[in-house]
Image (cartoon, coloured by chain):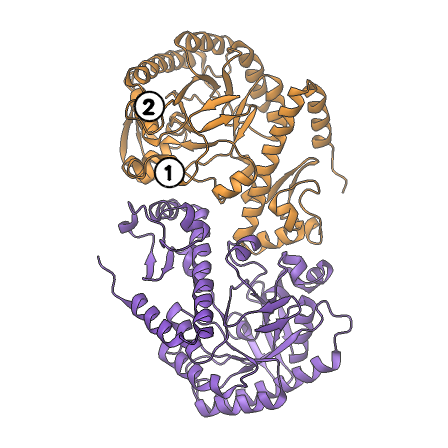
Chain colours: A orange, B purple
Amino acid sequence: MLKTAHGQINTPVYMPVGTQGTVKAISTQELKDCSAEIILGNAYHLYLRPGLDIIKKAGGLHKFSGWDRPILTDSGGYQIFSLATLRKLSDEGAEFSSHIDGSKHFITPEKAIDIQQTLGSDIMMILDECVHYPAARDYVEQSLALTTRWAKRAREYFKSKGDEGQVTKGQLLFGIVQGSTYLDLRKKAVEDLVGIGFDGYAIGGVSVGEPEHLIQEIAAYTAPLLPENKARYLMGVGTPPDIIQAIASGIDMFDCVIPTRNGRNGQAFTWDGDIQLRNAEYKEDFRPIDETCECFACRNHTRAYIRHLFNTQEILGLRLVSLHNLHFYVKLIQLSRKAIKEDRFGGFKDEFLKRYNKPKEK
Amino acid sequence: MLKTAHGQINTPVYMPVGTQGTVKAISTQELKDCSAEIILGNAYHLYLRPGLDIIKKAGGLHKFSGWDRPILTDSGGYQIFSLATLRKLSDEGAEFSSHIDGSKHFITPEKAIDIQQTLGSDIMMILDECVHYPAARDYVEQSLALTTRWAKRAREYFKSKGDEGQVTKGQLLFGIVQGSTYLDLRKKAVEDLVGIGFDGYAIGGVSVGEPEHLIQEIAAYTAPLLPENKARYLMGVGTPPDIIQAIASGIDMFDCVIPTRNGRNGQAFTWDGDIQLRNAEYKEDFRPIDETCECFACRNHTRAYIRHLFNTQEILGLRLVSLHNLHFYVKLIQLSRKAIKEDRFGGFKDEFLKRYNKPKEK
């Protein structure tokens, strides 16, 4: 359970990704219909478009986007190191060129706080350097030292500002554990961040190109080092099995674009694994995506119809699969939560993985 | 009021266009939320994709698409003469190549009935030749004679088949009045079709390239010639003022892609005229599209937000404007219906046109 300015969040929780102030192809009502408790917004994208002036005048991101439940905003760290070009890092901050129009911008740990306070998110993330895989140990050590200095500055700046005049009072600030695949550096990062003190801790710098098993190794190693009474958030992960395994490692929060991004390409998740609805085998399959699912797509439409929609480039197709996948992710998390409460998560996990990974009959 | 196998329809009525078995970007629930009473499907498109086999196995178009209210299907006449290539007309029927894969097909007036009976639409349209503008009188005379022969064959074939074994019992069959811009030919077409006898009559071959005022002239001339106790349907028309004016001429039914097609480009309809939401002037406009509208978009989102969605190519933008425009069209028709019942349509029409066409303050 996590208390935010816009309401409590049950954990573990999956956060649909609303990069540009909308979860792609999905309405706020549909998010509520699938019991999404919190969504993610992206400071980098929103800072560039529509820009902070407009969001400030709208009264913050909640009002601008029409979403009244909690929002977590990423600081932009990940985007500066993945999307933006011509980055120049200094102790002061990160200079980068917009991926949209090439315009130059300079973000400091303090400015990242300012931006997220203008957005008025419930949970802010610190600015960090997100190192890609593979990275030399030397580089990671230096980078981590910078991220830690930035974390300290962010925390102090946030503390000094207080709630006065803020769109969202009682904002939370999360630290981000970096350290690439070097577990001892992950440990050091945890110690330094916990020393500074944050409202929650994310494990960042995963899902950045490393082999899949390393994500789980990093999560399994790092999560137990983090304070038990604070939320632990694994950034950008992952497939349904990834999520189930990370929950077993003690992770509380997830964000991932897979349900919507893959949904837009026709990939749907079911308890028996994922299926590609554009495939010819679904041409005359008049069953719903998932017989047990209660989402709008499964209650009203068949695989054959959705395949037809993809085949004819109809937007409703990607809407329906995105919607179903979000339902599936939220349901997966809800069932995990229930299993944890009832102290039978291990069995739930094994059963889920066995069924999900079972080869499909052809 | 029009009775169909899937329920009664109040007239005048606007039919959202669901060419390929879906109103573009809109769900069946959203269609119901905006009180759509009937939608249009397209035999040409559905015959090519997903094909009749699949729709037959699904149990008809209603079941295939998940829409349980009435459906009118166009025969494909218009598409054969606008989309398909390499057409070859004979007395027997129309040969054409698919606009998708070039495959050859041959449609007769009888086959058009068979197709629409497999689709199981509530209202079928006869196969006609849809002549484009401008067309020489000689050509139109010959074409009209063919359309009339086809109409007679369609009517007889439909009668001979009966309801036995049909997906939708009690299907209606509408004739289509052609004649291009030659009013005497329109008159002859009406006489011939009424002589054959149909469940309703459409005015086709409008909105095919002619100057706008001709659409209204043809409608105003033709509608009063048609039987008062049968539905009169003006095909493919039009803008909100077009519709209001055609109602004044006695038209009962409309279909038009403008609300959804223009909606996907950011054009929204309001009682004060249409607005282009991508324009910079809406950047900081935190009002809904229309203050008085009760659609989801207007209840939850601002012009500034929707502009941002278009600016960032987010699908939710075109969803919201399509949805709003459909609400607007249905509301326009509902208010017209009310005004007709209360015998004050003339005043309603003048007031609507005055406000709608008033130059906007800048």
Q: Quadrant of residue A162?
A: top left
* Picture quarter with the C terminus of chain B: bottom left
Q: Secondary structure at mark 2?
A: helix
Sequence order check, earlier mark of 1 and 2: 1
Find residue B239 and report its horizontal and vertical position in percent.
Answer: 40, 68
Chain of the residue on which disc 2 is drawn: A
Q: Foreground: B287 or A271?
A: B287
Find residue A278 and report its horizontal and vertical position in percent.
Answer: 62, 48
Chain of the residue on which disc 1 is drawn: A
Who's the residue at 29% across and 49% down the image? B282
* Picture quarter with the N terminus of chain B: bottom right
Indicate left or right for B304 with B65 as reference: left
- Residue A247 tag number: none
Q: Foreground: A159 or A308?
A: A159
Pointer 1 residue: A63
Q: Secondary structure at mark 1?
A: helix
Residue count near mark 2 (Cα–Cα under 10 Å), binned few <14, some 14–19, many ≥20: many
Residue lying furthest left in this view? B362
Indicate left or right for B316 with A275 as reference: left
Look at label 2 and name its amino acid: Ile
Residue A280, relative to residue A115: is it above or below?
below
Look at label 1 and name its amino acid: Lys
- Residue A113 tag number: 2
Residue count near mark 1 (Cα–Cα under 10 Å), binned few <14, some 14–19, many ≥20: many
Indicate left or right for B104 with B298 as reference: right
Q: Quadrant of residue B101?
A: bottom right
Callout count: 2
- Measure how far apart labels 1 and 2 are at the Cα level: 19 Å
- Discs 1, 2: same chain: yes
